[in-house]
Amino acid sequence: MSFIGPLLIAWLLLLSLIQIVILWKYLQTLRCATQPPDGLNDYPPAVAILCLRGADPFLSDCVRRLLDSSYPQLTIRIVVDSADDPSLSVVRTILETRNDSRAELMILKNRLPHCSGKVSGLLQATESLPQDCQIVAWIDGDSLLHRTALQELADGLRDPAIGAVSGNRWYLPPEASLSGLTRMLWNGFAVPAMNIVGVLWGGCMAARADDFRNPELRELLAASFIEDSTVASFVRASGRRTRLIASAILLNRESISLKHYYQFATRQLFTVRIDNSRWLWILLHMFPLNLSLLLSLVPMCMPWLPYWGGITAAYFVLLSTMVAAIPVGHQNVKRILNARGENVPAISTAQWALLPVALMMPNQLNLASTINTFFIRKLTWRGITYQFGRNPKCTIVNVKPMTQPEPSMMNSVV
């Protein structure tokens, strides 16, 4: 049994090395963030799509920022889930005020039975793309775009070897809450892994219009729970790559409860599991890492063990490599946002005081979320209940009218 201690130490150090490589690749991506484009020429015609069900807390800001986009040849299509949806009045008020000829308001006509409401909206919005349209971009109702975000996504598609691109989100809760800080830390750990594996975020994403004209992709989407994983997997299957656009990272200041955070984190992993070709890579990274951090606490509580000092040291080396993603990410995101004129609020004293407690949460909750994804058979998201199986993979079994925003919708759960 004497080999167990050295083996555990070596394992923890190997995981540390992997974390260092992931963080290094993420830092490279962040350093490649370009300055905001200052020209309006040489951008192909594009369609930007916003699919809505329920009124997100910052929906007004989201719509206004989309209308403020500096993309030169842009058609904006906003698809609202139903005529009774609470987001419709918000959107209509803004469109009537702005009178922007680029914007088209649509009501979802056909909720497809085997995909999410968002995917149904995306398919409707891309049914009749303008003939000259070359890029399709889409965002979520909690995405606060900067003026040049769509241009930055389009720049990422100039390389013909790249088939899909996305930004990502960086959470910074407005208050000192355990749930908000836990999600901030979870996201800080998740984005570097998403970057190296190639998992895109559908909250600010773009792909080529010809792919959306392709019947094969449309058929895949019609049977998918989420669009970002399906589009990314389709692109990679065609021999092209995906890319995170660091300059399109968006700051998110919404609040969330601990219960809704866990539901959010579980759903993020679940969507990757059922629709993304890179799920195995994510699983092989996260599960051993989270499990090792948890189980290593057992020998660390036994100071009489021969290799206790080495195990403890290796554990804190691993923990340090993970925690390093937070200040590295925060400082670089701050630099990127400052370059485009956005102010990033400082982490408050109360938040700093709560951070050591929050640091203990993501690992355990992420481990539970990962395991939970294998047992999900039903899931309710934005008032729609989905059932999951083999064939079909996803089926809508109940749709609850969203005449009023649900309490959970007042937090970021997308």
Image (cartoon, rainbow, N blue to C red):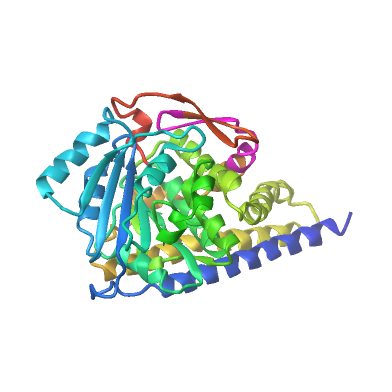
Q: Name the residue at 33% across, 50% down.
A: 49
Q: Name the residue at 35% across, 74% down.
A: 34
36 in relation to 359, above or below:
below
Asked which quadrant contains residue 413, the reply is top left
Q: Is residue 366 visible?
A: no
Which quadrant of the figure contains the N terminus?
A: bottom right
**Could you say which is closer to the camera, residue 307 or residue 396?**
396
Q: Position of residue 169 (x, y in %)?
A: 39, 55
**In magenta segment, residue 370:** yes
112 in relation to 144, above or below:
above
Q: Is residue 144 left or right of residue 188?
A: left
Q: Position of residue 217 (x, y in %)?
A: 51, 52
Question: Which portion, as a residue range, is magenta?
Answer: 369-384
**In magenta segment, residue 235:** no
Q: Name the residue at 16% across, 53% down.
A: 101
Which quadrant of the figure contains the C terminus?
A: top left
Q: Position of residue 230 (x, y in %)?
A: 53, 51
